[in-house]
Amino acid sequence: MGLTNISATITNLDDRRKQASGEFLVDTGAGYTVIPYSMVKKLNLKPTKKQIFSLADGTTVTRNMGYALIKVDFTNQKAGVQEAPSAVVLGQPNDSALLGVITLENMGLIVDPFKRELRPMKLMLA
């Protein structure tokens, strides 16, 4: 389910001086956050592995994965400013910028499907 577009700042974990901001579609149907190709190049994000993904139409694609720090301001949605490191897909040209559910969980957020907004999740240790 596509939710909304939000602005996020991506930071290279190996060089915190390298940052880039852009619009991302919050997509609970996407497991991983996809960093657009232009940001991958600007931030000099390095791949740590390759992964095969299935797309909604059934086709498969292979993408490099890496890690980045993701910061999002959700103050208008009661979740405040959130920041977390996350495994990310290093996008190729024409890949869409997506904020996936794994990143949301890293930030301790869930999607309220009725209000179509993000809110803090109830966290459990067990």
Image: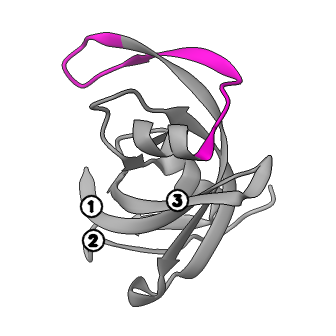
Residue placed under numbered mark 2 in the picture: 116
Asked if one can make out residue 102 in the rendered structure from this viewpoint, the answer is: yes
Disc 1/disc 3 C-alpha distance (Å): 22 Å
Q: What element carries label 2?
A: loop
Boundaries of the magenta span: 43-60
Q: Nearer the viewer, mark 1 or mark 3?
A: 3
Q: Which comes sooner in the sequence, label 2 or label 3?
A: 3
Q: Residues within 10 Å of mark 2 (few under 14, many from 20)?
A: few
Whole-angstrom CA distance, mark 2 to mark 3, is 26 Å
Q: Are marks 2 and 3 in contact (CB under 8 Å)?
A: no
Quadrant position of residue 37: top left
Query: Which residue occupies the foreground of this view, 36 or 2?
Result: 36
Residue, disc 1: 3
Q: Which residue is drawn at 29% across and 64% down?
A: 5
Asked if disc 1 and disc 2 are in contact, CB closer than 8 Å, the reply is yes
Q: Earlier in the sequence, mark 1 or mark 2?
A: 1
Which secondary structure, mark 1? strand
The three-letter code of the residue at mark 2 reads Arg
Q: Which mark is residue 84?
A: none
Residue under label 3: 20
Residue 62 rendering spot, x and y as whole percentages: 45, 13
Extreme residue toward the left, this view:
57
Q: Position of residue 17 (x, y in %)?
A: 72, 61
Q: Position of residue 53 (x, y in %)?
A: 43, 18
**Numbered disc in front, either 2 or 3:** 3
Q: Distance between the residues labelled 1 and 2?
A: 6 Å
Residue 8 shown in magenta: no
Sequence-wise first label, 1 or 3: 1
For the residue labelled by badge 3, is the local secondary structure a helix, a strand or a loop? strand
Residue drawn at (24%, 25%), measured in percent from left and top? 56
Kind of residue at badge 3: Ala
Q: Residue 58 colored magenta?
A: yes
